[in-house]
Image: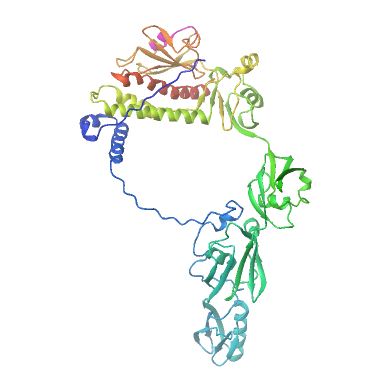
C-alpha cells in the first residue's frame, strides 16, 4: 500500500481582536467562535509582561536510599498524626505527673472537682486522703478511686474522667531528619514522635527503632510490621525523659522484577527471600517461578545464583543482593462481533490477529471479514494529534486571512474537523485464507488492542451533500453515480469534484469527478463500491491560498468517523 504523507504548516499569528471584523466573528458557529476568540486572547496574553514571585516548597534532603520500602510513610512533613483534642482515650492510658482527673460524686455526697497528679504521683481527695495513681492505667486508677469513695461515703458513686493530658519531653536522636528535644502530649507513641522529627533519613533503619528509658531499651519499633501487617499496638507509651534512637539501616535487598511491589527493602540478619517477598506483596500473576535469579556484587566481582522456589525459605541474602523473577509477557486483547467466542483474551507477546481469531473459535457463518476493524491506542493518539494540528492550522488561517466572508465555507470545514470522531483504526487483512497464503499480511497485536468483526451487510451508505443521505441496497458492479442518484442526487452546495469513498476495510479513496479516476489508488479495484462502503460528498468551499490546499483533508478526517459509523451499522446487520 502506498504511503501518503501530510504536511501541515502552522502559520504565525499576527493579529489581535481589533483587526478582525466583529460581525464576521459573530457569524461563526458558536464553538468555532469561542476557539477563535480564545486563540486571539492567548496571543494577547503572551505579549503581557510576566511577573512571578518565587515559589516556596519544603523538600527533604536527598538521601542515599530514596526508594527503600517505608520511606514514603514519613514523606509528608506534618506536626503530628494526632488530632488536637482527644476525647476518647484508651482505658490502658498510663497516668503520670501532669495529668488531670475530674471526679464527680453522686449520692450521699454530691460534688465535682478536678485533681492534678502531683510530682509524687498522687492526688489528694478530701475525706479520703492521698491516692497514688501514677503508673496506673486509667482503668485501674478509676477502680481504685471508686473503691475508696464507696468506703468513705455510703450510697455514693464516683465517675472519673481524664480531663487534661500531660505534656512530655522526648529526645529523638540517631538517623532522623530533625533530631532534638520534642514536646508531645502524654498519649503519644513512637510513630507520633518520629513524624514530629520529620521521619527517618536515608541511612536510618525502619526495622530497629529503640525506645530507651532510664538507660535501658524497653521497646522496639519495626515499621515494616506496621506497613505489612498493621501491627501498631506498642506495649509502652512515652514518658518524659524517654529517648528514641533510630539506628543505621540493616542490609538493603531489592526485588527488581516479578513481585507485586518491586523495590528496595531492608531485611534483618535472619530474614530470607521468603520474607522479602512477603514485604513485596508476593509474586505477580505472570511471574515465572521456575526462573529466579539472585545477582550479587562482592569485592568488585559479580555473581549470580539460580534458585528454585522451594529454596527461598532457606536463602539468606546479603546486603546489595538483587532478586530477578522472569515474567511471562502477556497482553490483553479484545475481540467482538461475529466470532464464536467473543471476549477479552490474554495472549503472549508477539501473538497475531490469526492467533486471536483462533482462540475466539473462528468466524461465524455471517461474518464479514472485509469490514474487520482493528483499533490500537497508538493509532488513536496519532490521529487525535493530527486532527488537533489540522484544526489549529485552519483556525490560524481564518484569523490571518482578512478577505474571508461569512459565506466562504471555512466555518463549515472548521466545524467538520472539530466534530469529527477520530478513531484508532489500523488497516489490516482479516481474511484467514489470504493470510495463510501470505503470512506477511498477518498483524502483530499489542496490549489493549480491540478487534471487531462485523456481520455481512447488503447496504451502501451515502453521506454528505445529497438529497437523501442514508443507506441503499448494494447492487453488484454499480459505481458511485448509481448510488448518488439513488440518494436523490447532489445538493447545490456539494463539491462534485471531490467524492470520497470509504471501503469497509477502512481505506479511503478520493474520486476526482472531473477525471472519473480515483486519486491515491493502490490497485485498479479501489474505485469499486462494496457492501458496507461509504460514499461521502463534501460541501463545497470558496477558499484561497493555503486554505484551499488544506480543505481537502477535512472530508478525509470526517470519513474516519464515518467508517466507524458504518461499522456500527454493519455489526447490527445480518
Is residue 486 rendered to the left or right of residue 32?
Answer: right
> In this rendering, does residue 572 appear at all?
no
User: Is 146 placed above or below 518 here?
Assistant: below
Spot occupied by residue 300 in the image (x, y as percentages of width and height):
70, 46
Nearest the eye: 216 or 98 = 216
Nearest the eye: 199 or 187 = 199
> In this rendering, does residue 43 appear at all?
yes
Spot occupied by residue 521 in the image (x, y as percentages of width and height):
47, 11
For the rendered model, the colour scheme is rainbow
Spot occupied by residue 461 in the image (x, y as percentages of width and height):
44, 17
Residue furthest to the front in view is 300
Residue found 27% across the figure and 31% down from its top: 14
Q: What stretch is highlighted in magenta?
A: 476-484
User: Is 545 placed above or below 182 here?
Assistant: above
Nearest the eye: 477 or 434 = 434
Q: In which quarter of the image is residue 395?
A: top left
Spot occupied by residue 171 in the image (x, y as percentages of width and height):
57, 71
Residue found 29% across the figure and 44% down from its top: 49
Q: Quadrant of residue 241?
A: bottom right
User: Is 282 placed above or below 569 here?
Assistant: below
Residue 477 among magenta residues = yes
So how many labels did they put on this image?
0
**Which quadrant does the C terminus fall into?**
top right
Residue 49 among magenta residues = no
Is residue 209 rendered to the left or right of residue 198?
Answer: right
Amino acid at each position: 500500500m502506498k504511503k501518503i504523507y501530510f504536511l501541515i504548516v502552522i502559520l504565525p499569528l499576527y493579529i489581535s481582536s481589533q483587526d478582525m471584523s466583529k460581525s464576521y466573528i459573530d457569524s461563526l458557529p458558536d464553538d468555532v467562535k469561542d476557539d477563535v476568540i480564545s486563540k486571539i486572547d492567548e496571543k494577547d496574553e503572551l505579549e503581557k509582561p510576566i511577573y512571578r514571585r518565587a515559589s516556596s516548597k519544603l523538600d527533604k534532603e536527598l538521601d542515599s536510599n530514596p526508594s527503600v520500602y517505608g520511606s514514603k510513610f514519613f514523606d509528608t512533613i506534618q506536626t503530628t498524626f494526632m488530632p488536637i483534642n482527644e476525647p476518647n482515650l484508651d482505658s490502658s492510658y498510663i497516668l503520670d505527673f501532669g495529668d488531670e482527673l475530674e471526679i464527680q460524686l453522686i449520692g450521699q455526697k454530691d460534688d465535682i472537682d478536678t485533681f492534678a497528679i502531683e510530682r509524687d504521683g498522687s492526688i489528694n481527695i478530701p475525706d479520703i486522703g492521698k491516692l497514688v495513681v501514677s503508673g496506673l492505667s486509667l482503668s485501674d486508677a478509676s477502680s481504685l478511686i471508686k473503691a475508696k469513695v464507696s468506703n468513705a461515703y455510703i450510697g455514693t458513686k464516683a465517675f472519673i474522667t481524664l480531663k487534661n493530658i500531660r505534656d512530655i519531653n522526648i529526645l529523638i536522636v540517631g538517623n532522623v531528619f530533625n533530631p532534638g528535644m520534642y514536646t508531645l502530649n502524654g498519649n503519644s507513641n513512637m510513630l507520633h514522635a518520629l513524624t514530629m522529627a520529620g521521619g527517618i533519613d536515608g541511612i536510618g533503619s525502619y526495622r530497629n527503632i529503640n525506645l530507651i528509658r532510664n538507660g535501658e531499651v524497653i521497646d522496639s519499633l519495626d515499621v515494616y510490621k506496621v506497613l505489612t501487617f498493621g501491627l501498631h499496638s506498642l506495649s509502652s507509651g512515652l514518658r518524659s525523659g524517654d529517648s528514641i534512637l533510630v539506628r543505621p539501616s540493616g542490609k538493603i535487598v531489592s526485588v527488581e522484577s516479578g513481585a507485586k511491589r518491586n523495590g528496595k527493602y531492608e531485611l534483618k540478619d535472619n530474614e530470607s527471600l521468603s520474607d522479602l517477598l512477603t514485604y513485596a506483596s508476593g509474586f505477580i500473576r505472570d511471574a515465572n517461578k521456575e526462573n529466579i535469579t539472585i545477582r550479587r556484587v562482592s569485592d568488585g566481582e559479580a555473581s549470580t545464583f539460580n534458585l528454585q522456589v522451594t529454596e527461598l525459605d532457606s536463602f539468606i541474602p546479603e546486603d546489595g543482593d538483587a532478586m530477578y523473577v522472569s515474567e511471562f509477557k502477556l497482553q490483553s486483547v479484545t475481540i467482538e462481533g461475529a466470532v464464536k467466542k467473543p471476549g477479552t483474551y490474554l495472549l503472549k507477546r508477539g501473538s497475531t490477529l490469526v492467533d486471536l481469531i483462533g482462540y475466539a473459535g473462528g468466524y461465524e457463518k455471517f461474518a464479514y471479514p472485509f469490514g474487520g476493524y482493528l483499533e490500537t491506542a497508538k493509532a488513536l493518539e496519532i490521529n487525535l494529534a493530527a486532527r488537533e494540528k489540522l484544526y489549529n492550522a485552519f483556525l490560524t488561517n481564518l484569523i490571518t486571512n482578512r478577505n474571508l466572508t461569512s459565506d466562504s465555507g471555512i466555518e463549515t470545514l472548521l466545524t467538520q474537523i472539530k466534530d469529527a470522531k477520530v478513531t484508532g483504526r489500523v488497516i489490516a487483512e482479516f481474511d484467514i485464507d489470504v493470510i495463510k497464503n501470505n503470512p506477511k499480511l498477518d498483524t502483530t497485536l499489542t496490549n489493549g488492542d480491540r478487534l471487531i468483526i462485523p456481520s455481512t451487510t447488503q447496504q451502501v451508505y451515502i453521506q454528505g451533500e445529497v438529497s437523501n443521505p442514508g443507506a441503499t441496497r448494494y447492487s453488484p458492479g454499480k459505481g458511485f453515480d448509481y448510488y448518488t442518484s439513488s440518494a436523490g442526487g447532489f445538493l447545490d452546495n456539494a463539491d462534485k469534484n471531490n467524492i470520497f469513498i470509504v471501503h469497509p476495510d477502512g481505506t479511503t479513496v478520493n474520486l476526482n469527478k472531473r477525471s472519473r479516476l480515483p486519486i491515491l489508488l493502490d490497485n485498479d479495484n479501489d474505485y469499486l463500491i462494496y457492501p458496507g462502503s461509504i460514499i461521502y460528498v463534501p460541501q463545497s468551499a470558496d477558499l484561497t491560498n493555503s486554505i484551499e490546499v488544506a480543505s481537502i483533508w477535512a472530508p478525509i478526517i470526517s470519513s474516519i468517523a464515518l467508517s466507524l459509523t458504518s461499522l456500527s451499522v454493519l455489526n447490527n446487520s445480518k
